[in-house]
Image (cartoon, rainbow, N blue to C red):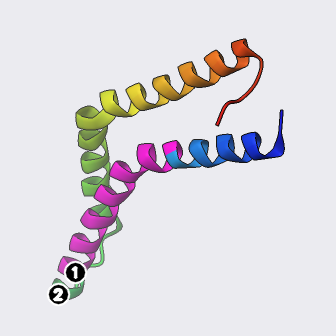
Amino acid sequence: MEDAALLALADRMLWVTALVAAPVLLASLAVGLVVGLVQAATSVNEQTLTFVPKLIVTALVLVLFGGAMMALIGDFATEIFAQIAKGGVAT
């Protein structure tokens, strides 16, 4: 297997990982920012106030986008296994 093919495979792997992680991370970031602003405005510094909304939003995002995330991972795995069966990684 050539170095260029391995680098292309690693690039695709990182891209798929970013696409799968992005919805959860962005939703948690947005909720954390909103809760942080509310806490700063009201001077309420309760730790569970940030944890519970993030947990709820993360679960909701996984319910809504979990199927698409798993389909993306499944397609990538199928592609990799097909390339292994052919005897190499095609770019």
Query: How far apart are the two marked residues, 1 and 2, measured between alpha carbons?
Result: 6 Å
In the image, taking residue 80 as reference, residue 16 lies left or right, namely: left
Residue 40, percent across and down? 24, 86
Residue in the image at 26% along x and 33% along y: 63
Q: Is residue 24 above or below residue 38?
A: above
Count of numbered circles on the image: 2
The quadrant of the rendering that contains the C terminus is top right
* Magenta run includes residue 53: no
Is 24 colored magenta in this rendering? yes
Q: Nearer the viewer, residue 69 or 3?
A: 3
Q: Residue at x 71, y 14 (%)?
A: 86
Residue 70 versus residue 16: which sits nearer the camera?
16
User: Where in the figure is residue 44, as x and y percent of width and height?
Assistant: 23, 79
Q: Amino acid at mark 1?
A: Leu
Magenta: main secondary structure equals helix
Verify CB contact (< 8 Å) between mark 1 and mark 2: yes
The part of the chain drawn in magenta is 16-39
10 Å crowding of disc 1: few (<14), some (14-19), many (20+): few
Identify the residue position indicated by label 2 in the image: 41
